Amino acid sequence: MTQEQKVIPFNQDVALYYKIATQKVRQQSYDKARHYLEKVLELSPDHFEAREQLAICYEKLRNLRKAEALYYDAISDGRDLEASYYALSQLNITMNEPNKAYLFGLNYVFTSGDEDYRDELESMFDVSFHEEATLKQESQLFTVQVIFQYLFGEGRLLDARTYILRQDEDIQDNRIVRNLLAMCYLYLNENQIAKEMYERLLREDPSDVYALCHYTLLLHNMNEQQLFERYVQRLNKIMPMNDDETFKLGIVLSYLKQYEASQQLLIPLHRKGKFQTFQLFNALSVNYYYLGNRTQSEYFWNKLATFSRAYPGLPPWVIDSRIAYFDEHIAPLLMSEDQHRRLYGLFLLNQLNGKEVLMTRDVWEILESLGDYEKLYLSYLIQGLHLTKLDFIHRGMLALYEVPTTREDTALYLRWIAYAEDLLAMEIDKENVKPFIAAVVFLYLNTTEAPQSKETCCQMFGVTEESFSAALDTLMSI
């Protein structure tokens, strides 16, 4: 038998993974079982038996929050509601969380019609009878808030919005749920919808802390400066009544760059182990950085790695370096009277990792002042607009950017743009840009103190000497 025949093919087969996991559970090897069950759910998210087994593994491994999250995911997707509510009720009995156990249990009862379980719950928790419709709404509202906060805390904003919009109309119209949905629109930058929702909420209750916080943040984002200043003054007078209000106010103050005031609210919550969410760690990292404690900032930023399904963006120290680079190198190019420099500035702006952090009002004012040609290039970069001529120029700059020795030579980029515009007036193969780039680099470097051979320029850009010579002949004919 050959060596290859001795190797058992281990395909990503759901049944095989589940079989191995089941064996590991029987052997009480819960961590190994967890590994295979996670693979099952990755390949087949609707495999509820695997979800239940994985929750048991997490429970045995004393990670009850992860066990809960498995059922939250199922509910948020609208899958296996009855079984998930029941499992969460049982899990919270184990966790000694009577309120959650009872309310998740009620959701199970209203979904399944299992009145025996309701009797069991009311006997266990010594619950007094409430009006049926009120009890049903209370249990539904509880679940919506818990699932939404879980999704939002993971940074899964689109999932959170979709989950709320799938609820019954009377639940969606509840004030608490409208506040949650408005917050979702705010963080998704759907400002006009968020504004209309917050203004309605504040007409109904001008003292609503959640609406006040987020409406102030919205006004800041929309540059409604006069109204924003008025609401900031109101925020500074708020005395939070509970941990939820404290958390919300602390997060918003961080966004508004009031870092010291934010820390005074958020640090005590963190020390109590409250609200260990994506938003909390992000705010603490930002606050610490701008208050001068880089070590603590890095500590909290690293904790964001536990939220695997959320993109944390760039850490504050990287954002600072990007802004400094923009101010020093890109802004002067964009504001130059030379069109070629402005094109090169747009190219560099596009190369910045996390360039969205630079899309401030001031930057957009600069971009808005550009000419039509530069705005076309901006549309090409942002929207993928197909523009043959600008694509040729851009791919040439990209080739220069990919070679370390040519990446930062501004004069070389400008030389390329000038040559490229002349080449575009000729009948050339616009798809094959690298031979022309190699030829331009050869001509340019031979005017400097570091000339290079034709062979070296060919190697730099991976082109043949034949294509290089043809491109060089074309350039020399211009």
Image (tube, rainbow, N blue to C red):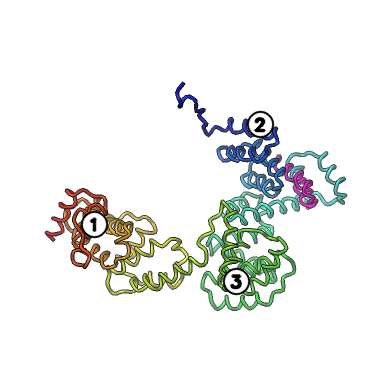
Residue 141, x across and y down, in percent? 71, 53
Question: Which amino acid type corresponds to the residue marked 1 in the rendered image?
Answer: Ile
From the image, tell me which residue sits under label 1: 437
The image quarter containing residue 20 is top right
Question: What is the span of residues highlighted in magenta in the rendered image?
Answer: 83-106
**Residue density around tag 3, few if under 14, some if 14–19, many if 20 or more, within 10 Å:** many
From the image, tell me which residue sits under label 3: 216
Is residue 464 left or right of 177 when viewed as pictured?
Answer: left
Q: Earlier in the sequence, mark 2 or mark 1?
A: 2
Query: What numbered label is drawn on residue 23?
Result: 2
Residue at image x 66%, y 31%? 23
**Residue density around tag 1, few if under 14, some if 14–19, many if 20 or more, within 10 Å:** many
Give the overall secondary structure of the magenta segment. Answer: helix
333 vs 173: above or below:
below
Is label 3 in a helix, a strand or a loop?
helix
Residue 75, x across and y down, in percent? 65, 45
